[in-house]
Image (cartoon, helix red, strand yellow):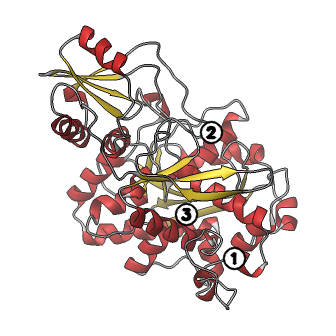
Amino acid sequence: MLPSLPSFAFVSVQTTGGSPATERIIEIAILRFTPEGVEEWSRLVNPERGITDAVQAGTGITRAMLAEAPIFEELAREVTGLLAGHVFVAHQAKGAHGALKRAFARMDAEFDVPVLCTARLSRRLYPKEKHHGLDAIVGRHGLIAGHDAASRHRALGQARLCLQFWQKLQRVFSASELERAVNRLATPASNNTPLLSRDDTSPAAPVDSGPVILQWDALGTAFQAALMSAQARSGLPRPGGARHSGTFAWRLTRDLVSGTLGLSAPDDPDLGISGDLYGVFRSRTRARNWLRELALETGLCTTHLGLDERTADPACPARRIGRCMGACLGRESAEAHFQRLDAALQPHRVGPWPIRGPLLVQHKDGFHVVDHWRYLGVAAGMDDVSTLQARGRDGLAFDADIYESWLYHQADVEGSSEYR
């Protein structure tokens, strides 16, 4: 371990799926370094509700196994003890951390730990690589989850992969390089939550009745660069209708039992406003490539998702290589497939604007004014801010650079940086 960093706990959580507000934990694994070696702890958790056939097939965890397992309240003290004094490390850590945070909240208890996402760590240390999903990391570094293929989909196997990835990094990078990366990416405990943050269970609620003013020096360099780029595109002092074109997202439209997924129009006016959009992409091709990677990681059907045309062979291309759970063959219902799609998309939801009013960033030119992830322009003073607000956001596109660099600045553990 790096002497200047706290100990790491490598965590994986399996859930019933569905929306974050309704999902329940079914398995937890926590791995820690000890003087004797790696300590492995894993437990099944009775979710006190049923699980779908798709969850059983995808994890190998059956209803009978869960019926005999303890409920989360019986394990909470042990989980807290294992994680105390450790950085919570997981792949796409926002999902695992959020599931535990909500489980503790249902007990009226706080869950307050620093968090590090291995997907973001991979992206920072291997910037030339395109893909940073767990399957991509496993293949790139030759990691092994366990003695059989089924281990890959259990919590213990996934936690082992995260630990092995960290051990691999220690062999490739210097201690100082890893220290800088971890210090940059680790999100502090929730009692240090920054001003603009997104809730895991619902669209972010407005938290202020007026403009929020931030100082330039308090921002990360990526967010500063995004603001300066937006200013340069706008033509001072007002964007004048200039558009940050070519931004796409996936829209999930629900019906009574399931729903459909479709790609938004470029620069959809609902971006940053509606809660049913997922991912931010610079082109249709990037959006489709990202969705295909997500499908392969989670066993979704590429035919059902509209990524591949139906052919004489009913099996989709993902099924032919053993990466689809069989919705194309009728082995998984459309409703169950949609539930898993919904769960897979939730960590990537485009967060609505989290404050009431604009964000003002004070700089030498005055105030950069941003509202609903749209760059309004530069204001010399508060009167000019009011003028920009009065002109409104009509004709101004969602700025993907500002949105993504703000999330990076916030160290929001999401996956949201997975979109690029």
Q: Is residue 401 visible?
A: yes
Amino acid type shown at disc 2: Thr
User: At which x and y percent is residue 184?
Assistant: 29, 46
**Can you identify the residue that label 3 sits on?**
39
Q: Left or right: 290 with respect to 184?
A: right
User: At which x and y percent is residue 307?
Assistant: 55, 72
In front: label 3 or label 2: 2
Label 1 crowd (10 A; few <14 / some 14-19 / many >=20): many
Position of residue 15 relative to residue 311, above or below, is above
Dot 2: element: loop
Dot 3: element: strand
**Can you identify the residue that label 2 sits on?**
201
Seen from the viewer's position, the closer of residues 106 and 280 is: 280
Q: Left or right: 276 with respect to 47?
A: left
**Residue furthest top in the image:** 383
**Residue furthest bottom in the image:** 312
Q: Quadrant of the N terminus?
A: bottom left
Q: Quadrant of the C terminus?
A: bottom left
How far is disc 1 from disc 2 in space, using C-alphas? 27 Å
User: At which x and y percent is residue 24?
Assistant: 73, 50
**Can you identify the residue that label 1 sits on?**
325
CB contact under 8 Å: marks 1 and 2:
no
Dot 1: element: loop
Amino acid type shown at disc 3: Glu
Amino acid type shown at disc 1: Met
How far is disc 3 from disc 2 in space, using C-alphas? 32 Å
